[in-house]
Image: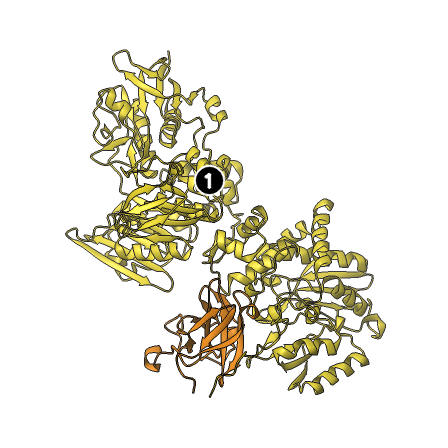
Amino acid sequence: MKRQLVVVGNGMAGVACVEQILKQSHNFEITIFGEETHVNYNRILLSLVLAGEKSPEDIVINDIEWYQTHDIRARLGVKITGIDRDKRVVIDEDGGETEYDKLILATGSSAFIPPIPGVEKKNVHVFRTLDDTRALLEKARPGLKTAIIGGGLLGLEAARGLQVRGCEVTVVHLMDTLMERQLDSTGGQYLKRKIESLGIRVMLPQQTAALFGNGRVDGLRFASGEEMEADLVVIAAGIRPNADLARSAGLEVRRGIVVNDYMETSDPHIFAVGECTEHRGQTFGLVAPLFDQGRVLASAITGNGGPAFTGASPAAKLKIMGVDIFSAGSIDESEPGVETVRYEDPSLGTYKKLLLKDDRLHGMILIGDIEDEHLYMDWMRNGTDLTPYRRQILFPPRDADPGREVADMPDSETICGCNGVRKGEIIEAIHAHGLTTLAGVKQCTRASTSCGSCTGLCEKLLRAVTPDFQEETRTTLCACVPFSYEQLRDIIRGQQLKSVEEVLNVYGNRKGCEVCKPALSYMLDMVWCGDHEEDRSARFINDRVHANIQKDGTFSVIPRMRGGVTTSDELRRIADVADKYKVPMVKVTGSQRIDLLGIKKADLPKVWADLGMPSGQAYTKGVRMVKTCVGTEFCRFGVQDSTSAGIELERRLENLFTPHKFKMGVVGCPRNCAEATVKDLGLVGQEGSWQVVVGGAAGKSVRKADLLITVETTEQAMEACDLFFQYYRENANYLERSYDFVERLGIEKIRKETVYAPEVEKTKLLDRLARAKALAKDAWLERETPVHPTQFVQIQPMEVPPT
Amino acid sequence: MNVAGVWTPITKIDNVPLREGRAVTVGGMEIAIFRLEDRCLTIENKCPHKGGPLCDGIVSGATVVCPLHGQRFDLETGMPVLASQPGGVAAYPTRVEGGIIFVDLGGSLKLPEEAAA
């Protein structure tokens, strides 16, 4: 007959422990009681739910099917109020009794609420459960004055989450260092600077004496007597083990439920696991040791024997995108025999400190550069003698053989500490499901889905095991908005953001810089196809005045001359402009156009009007020109009408913007006189067909373009151009030239998603291009309707001061 | 020579768009006035690196980035943001009253060369 196993607590530690038990024995009939009504979810990712990076569904670890598949009775929303150890039953709040042969207490912990007057007021929250998170999300809105009490891991993550939702957040911390349990004061300074640069206010040391307000909180009063307004207060002042149930049942309890090295409590039928426990005087608040506990408990409860739990050295990582903080081991420098090695670079925001004892790694603080976290953790865990590495210890050389690190690891080694996934399991999954991407590994094993610190290791494993490994590229735009391009496009689309300021205020540091502002401007224009709030202050000067700034502060003017074809009238007007404005230099460009150099800003609108030609966009990241040869019209070798095709192509795409400048060429025969094969997009005429080529370059890089497709008609060639053009616009990173883009994605993928895409996808791409084109206009028309009265006009002072 | 403590009215605040700069030639020099959310700030309009027009730079917080080569200056002090960058520019006290921007053209905050170096 099966024995009855009752688990009180449906959180990460309890359920992970049950998973381990299921692996070892099928002799239990299992009942899990959970006070929350949710299935088991990943509590450490709540901050990402708060920040909108994940949905509540994304963080479910065991869905309801899992319980069913394993014949586990899940009693959710049921609180256990007592244990009768003589009868061996647990008693729920309705008086119902459930018998057990073995009982596991996994009651977790609760937020510690300091005894501050006023904590009972409305709009004072804690941040601990999914329901807490939902409650916060309901309150959060742009501009809401929000105070976070507590500058530890959880407090900072909550702060960022709410700030991303638009709240005006201040972190109030009792100590003079943020995360003082993980960082020293220098590290705390670095962290503070980063947090502040994200647009979060930090006040420390600041003791909150009371929360004031009539029923609803209005603000905080500090011990210093100062006050601060706040409409929302989140208390993140630490956690306390939930041990009342055990205490009332007469089990030994100090701060937590006391367990031995096998996770047994003082009653041989009762075990405990997770944050409710106290082991050798230590309590727990981070997830990794809890999985170790679960494994030990499973071996003990199934009678399999096995390893003992010997405690855990602390390791903590802050989960705020763009703020890399890792701390592990002891950070106490005053310990006898401890030596400290450190490095810092304030401009880069990098700080590394290693604590050594007897030539072994004893603890570490890594800020800004946590690349070597795994190597250091290995050194620390294995007690590696560091004498041979001492000279390069802060910058350990990268292994020449990247597979080496994972090859050296035993299959039983835990790769993902958050979800307790071992190397062997990942390798098995890679083989069984033919995985080639990190996303696949995440989906099948759950490794790397929590804090993300094992992402690098999972990738190394993939690279070592599968020859077809596809790396995910995620380049963060810049420190002001620390998200990847893909994420930012999703954010702009998903959160319906229509101005650079909105993006910076909600997802960035509220300032922005010369790197991210133009990039965000481009992304907004691309995502909304021009239907957005254009903010000229976020644009480089060239895009404010539609001309290219020169070394002396004057500008160059290049009118559009489609396909490099002009007329005597145009040439005459250009000559007249050159005379009238005393243009210092008139130059034929490499793009078959004419450049007028040395024009004053104030003269630009007049010059454009006198030229009577549209902007050639030679100053911007946009469609430059189509260079052509004379083709069948005059050339005796021409087999296609390259001039007409080039003019047509230029008309189709002109006035649109691209991630980087975009140059084109059309040639009427393979002699390639207009160098179409070294352009971003080129058409090469053949007898009866066009070759469409993409990703060519003849600048800083020289690259021959790849063949996208060969088509028979000019119309088909134009469609292929449109498809590639819009695909590049939507998927390239800002300032990524087409030749880098084509190499990054590979021409085959690009073919599959453009010219060989299903009709419906092609139509969508072409529709979006058409929508953008419909709103695009010649920028030089601003000569008649400037966006601002002083866009071009020199301001004259109201009064000349006396001399 | 401009005398310190004299506030010269320069232009209507509406003539300078939010988070942009505009150049004005006044009192024998060229200044760049920047309009931030809550105030205006004024510096010399010439980057000490290669003479770039700072008024045309992108504003980042209370700093401006020279459009020519990316040198960055604090708009309040005129000091370069990176210590490795040589030299700063003069910064002039600025205030807004009745919608008019006033600058104290003699009140340059430029620090002595040795301090700026």
Mark 1 is surrounded, within 10 Å at the Cα level, by few (under 14), some (14 to 19) or many (20 or more) other residues, namely few
| Residue A407 can be seen, yes or no | no
Q: Which chain is orange?
A: B
Q: Quadrant of residue A30?
A: top left
Q: Is residue A575 above or below residue A187?
A: below
Mark 1 residue type = Lys
Vertical side of A606 occupied by A656: above or below: above
Give the image location of residue A73, x and y in percent. 43, 19
Residue denoted by label 1: A139
Figure check: A489 above or below A97: below
Task: Let me know if residue A485 appears in the view.
Answer: yes
Provide residue B95's location: percent of width, then percent of height.
45, 70
- The chain containing the residue under callout 1 comes to A
Quadrant in which the N terminus of chain A is drawn = top left
Question: Residue A752, relative to residue A343: is it above or below?
Answer: above
Q: Nearer the viewer, residue A92 or A251?
A: A92
Disc 1 element:
helix
Chain identity for the colour yellow used in the image: A
In this picture, residue A18 sits left or right of residue A583: left
Name the residue at 69% across, 59% down.
A707
Q: In x, y percent, where is residue A564?
A: 75, 74
Depth check: give the residue in front, A371 or A491. A491
